[in-house]
Image (cartoon, rainbow, N blue to C red):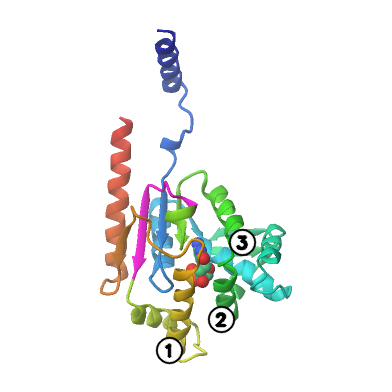
Amino acid sequence: MANTDTKRKAKARDLAFPTPDKARRGIVIAIDGPAGSGKSTLAALLARAYGYTNIETGAMYRALALKAIETNVAFDDSLALAELARQSRIELQAGEEGNRVVLDGRDVTEGIRRQDVTEAASQVSVHPPVREWMVRRQQEMGSGGGIVMEGRDIGTKVFPDAEVKIFLDAAPEVRGTRRFLQIPAATAPEAAVLAEMRERDKRDRSRANSPLEPAPDAITIDSTYLTLEQVVARVREIVDARLASRSSLRQ
Ligand code: DC
C-alpha cells in the first residue's frame, strides 16, 4: 500500500515538475559501416535534419594517429598509444561546414585527412586499450542523447542500446571510386586508392577487438545501387517511425 502511495506521489510530482528525463531527449542514431559507404555524408545530413549533434568517431582515431606520427610513437605500441590518448584532448566542434576537429587546442581538421594519417588511424585503432579510451570518451560525448554517431563499432560497443542502428555498406569497387573522387587533386591512381581501402577494410573487419560488423539488431542498407537521396529517405523513414513509436509510448 505504502509502495503504491509512493509511486502515485512520484507520478504526480513528475507531472507537475517534468524533469529532462531520457525520454524527452533526442534519440541515439548509430551509423556504422566500411570506408566509402557514405556514412559521413548520411550522418551529417541526418544531424542537420533532426537538429542533432554529429559525432564522427573516425576523426578521433585519426587525431590520435596524427599525434602518434608527430610524437614518434610506434603504431604497434599499444600501451604507449593508450597513454598518448589519455594525455590528449580531442574535441569535435560543430561548424558551418561540418565538424572541426581540435587536438590539444589545435585545429587539425584538414591534417587528419592526409593519406599517412588514414593508414596510421587504421593501425592505431586495433589496440584494445586505445579502443577502451575512445569508447569511454564517445559514451560521455553522447550521453545526453540527440546525436548521430558514426563509426565502426557504435551499434555494437559504444551505444548497444541506440534507438536506431544503421549498417551502411556498398560493393568495394563503388566505395573505392567514391573515396577516389573525394580526394582533392588526387595524388594516387584510382586502383591504388581501391587497393589501400581493401587493405584497411580487411584490418577493420578482422581485428580481434570490436571488428567492423553489423549489430544483430542493425538495419543493413546496401548503397551500391542507391543515390544519396534514396539512402537518406530510407533512413529518415526508419528514424521517423522510431520517434513516432517513442512518442506514442509516452502518451
Ligand atoms: O571512418 P574513418 O575512415 O575516418 O576512420 C579512420 C579509421 O579509424 C578506420 O581505419 C577505422 C577506425 N575506426 C574505428 O576503428 N572505430 C570507429 N568507431 C571509427 C573509426
Q: Amino acid at mark 2?
A: Gln
Considering the image in quadrants, where does the C terminus appear?
top left
Is tag 2's residue or tag 3's residue first in the polypeptide sequence? Answer: 2
Q: Position of residue 1 (x, y in %)?
A: 40, 7
Magenta includes 166?
Answer: yes
| SS label for mark 1 | helix
Q: Which residue is denoted by mark 3 in the rendering?
A: 130
Which of the 4 quarters of the picture holds residue 100? Answer: bottom right
Considering every residue shown, the one lying at the far front of the view is 208
Q: Which residue is denoted by mark 1 in the rendering?
A: 190
Q: At 61% from the left edge and 56% from the top edge, which residue is drawn?
A: 133
> In this image, 57 relative to 108: left or right?
left
Q: Are marks 2 and 3 in contact (CB under 8 Å)?
A: no
| SS label for mark 2 | helix
Boundaries of the magenta span:
158-169
Q: Are marks 2 and 1 in contact (CB under 8 Å)?
A: no
Magenta includes 161?
Answer: yes
Which of the 4 quarters of the picture holds residue 62? Answer: bottom right
Is tag 1's residue or tag 3's residue first in the polypeptide sequence? Answer: 3
Q: Which mark is residue 178?
A: none
Above-or-below relation of 201 to 2? below
Above-or-below relation of 180 to 47? below
Q: Position of residue 130 (x, y in %)?
A: 61, 61
Q: Position of residue 136 (x, y in %)?
A: 58, 51
Q: Amino acid at mark 1?
A: Glu
Q: Which residue is denoted by mark 2 in the rendering?
A: 115
Measure the alpha-carbon separation of dots 2 and 3. Answer: 21 Å
Considering every residue shown, the one lying at the far top of the view is 1
> In this image, 237 relative to 96: left or right?
left
